[in-house]
Image (spheres, rainbow, N blue to C red):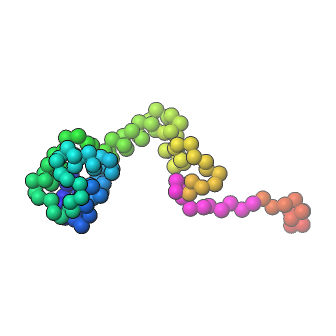
Amino acid sequence: MPRIAGVDIPANKRIEFALPYIFGIGRNNALDVLKEAGIEIGVKAKDLTEEQVARIGTVIERNYQVEGQLRRIIQSNITRLKDIKCYRGHRHRTHLPVRGQRTRTNARTRKGPRKTVAGKKGVKELARG
């Protein structure tokens, strides 16, 4: 299991599909990294030499923000939005969708499980009771 940027990438996958296991590296970035490092596409991660793994690591370290550093940047951006009290910061603070999605239905991922609220009783039921 090769270790790149502090992440163990899967050994049995082709390298262009294994690199996206690093937070901050997607499919297109993985192809760019391989091209810049001079590694052919299609080779399995377990077949890489130590020198090739080191080249991939230096390319990622030099050109991309990944893993912990990227997570800190994203979190600081969200904190900044909350501090300046903008609309997006308010949506983050109240755990609601940030990008304009509807909330009357759906949005269960952000809102959590349904909390059922009992409906109002009718006028006839109140008069009887």
Residue 100, compared with residue 21, is above or below; it is above
Looking at the picture, tell me which residue is in the foreground, 107 or 84.
107
Residue 98 sits above or below residue 85 on the image: below
Residue at image point 49% right, 34% down: 85
Q: Where is residue 100 in the image (x, y as percent from the top left)?
A: 56, 42
Residues rendered magenta in the picture: 109-119
Task: Please state, as top left, top right, bottom left or bottom right, where the N terminus lies in the image.
Answer: bottom left
Was residue 17 drawn as part of the magenta stretch in this picture?
no
Q: Which of 39 and 52 is in front in this view?
A: 39
Is residue 114 within the magenta segment?
A: yes
Name which residue lies at 42% across and 41% down.
Answer: 78
Q: Relative to the observer, which residue lies in front, 15 or 100?
A: 15
Image spot of residue 67 (x, y percent):
28, 50
- In the rendered image, which quarter contains the C terminus? bottom right
Which percent across, then down, holds residue 107? 57, 54
Left or right side of 88 for 120: right
Q: Quick check: 121 left or right of 78? A: right
- Quarter location, residue 79: top left
